[in-house]
């Protein structure tokens, strides 16, 4: 499938690799580290930050989008190559992770137990320690074939893992019916 034309407002010059960070305040340290890593990569990496955790705006060369309208346009244009997950809440899987997977984007994420429940390093994502973001971003920026393979495998994982709202609703209904049957 061919990528749609890219919106000039969300692309980087000279064909640079594009990365997106949809950030929440709890991910702030990881976000800032990811943004700084993008500046050090030998291959050009343009970063679009959606949201503004503390200190992220201070990183030179990062484009910040604040509104949901901008995010919708960005995602609809698929104007990025690498989806960054620099921080997660340890007890939940972030929804943005599944959105990135559906889009078939290469995912660079913090390696944590809840992320490993869904993704596997080198198979359908690139998982790194918090201090490994720079190297991970450099690796993915330099290897379009790896990005494509990881993105395709992440998209396939959505279907194989039944990570859909319908499947989650069916699990809840089944749990409730089992619980109700034990009460009668």
Image (cartoon, helix red, strand yellow):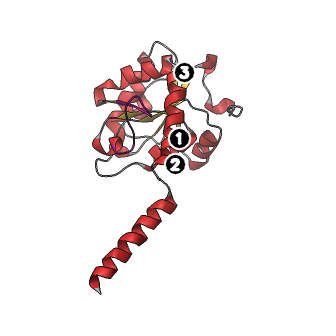
- Residue drawn at x 52%, y 33% is 151
* Front of the two marks 2 and 3: 2
Instruction: Please rate how many residues cluster around mark 3, counting C-alpha atoms within 10 Å: few if below 14, some from 14 to 19, many from 20.
Output: some
- Vertical arrangement, residue 164 with respect to residue 65, above or below: below
- Residue drawn at x 35%, y 42% is 115
Q: Position of residue 89 (x, y in %)?
A: 31, 47
Q: Position of residue 135 (x, y in %)?
A: 37, 20
- Vertical arrangement, residue 27 with respect to residue 165, above or below: above
Q: Give the spatial CA distance, label 2 vs label 3.
A: 24 Å
Residue 122: tell me if it is visible: yes
Residue found farthest to the top: 42
Q: Which residue lies under the disc numbered 1?
A: 155
Magenta region, residue range: 117-127
| Residue 122 lies within the magenta run | yes
Q: Give the spatial CA distance, label 1 vs label 3.
A: 17 Å
Q: Position of residue 107 (x, y in %)?
A: 46, 34
Identify the secondary structure beneath mark 2: helix
Q: Which residue lies under the disc numbered 2?
A: 159
Q: Which residue lies under the disc numbered 3?
A: 144
- Residue drawn at x 38%, y 76% is 177
Q: Name the image quarter holding the N terminus.
A: top right
* Front of the two marks 1 and 2: 2
Identify the secondary structure beneath mark 3: helix
Residue 62: tell me if it is visible: no
Q: Are marks 1 and 2 in contact (CB under 8 Å)?
A: yes
**Mark with earlier residue (2, 3):** 3
């Amino acid at each position: 499938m061919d990528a749609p034309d890219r919106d000039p407002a969300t692309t980087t010059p000279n064909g640079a690799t594009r990365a997106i960070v949809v950030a929440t305040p709890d991910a702030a340290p990881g976000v800032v580290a990811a943004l700084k890593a993008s500046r050090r990569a030998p291959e050009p990496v343009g970063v679009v930050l959606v949201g503004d955790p503390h200190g992220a705006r201070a990183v030179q060369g990062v484009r910040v989008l604040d509104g949901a309208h901008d995010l919708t346009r960005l995602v609809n244009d698929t104007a990025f190559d690498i989806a960054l997950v620099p921080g997660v809440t340890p007890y939940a899987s972030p929804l943005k992770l599944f959105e990135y997977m559906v889009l078939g984007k290469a995912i660079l994420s913090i390696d944590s137990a809840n992320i490993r429940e869904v993704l596997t390093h080198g198979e359908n994502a690139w998982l790194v320690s918090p201090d490994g973001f720079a190297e991970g971003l450099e690796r993915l920026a330099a290897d379009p074939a790896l990005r494509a393979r990881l993105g395709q495998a992440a998209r396939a994982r959505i279907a194989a893992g039944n990570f859909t709202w319908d499947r989650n609703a069916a699990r809840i209904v089944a749990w409730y019916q089992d619980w109700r049957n034990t009460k009668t």
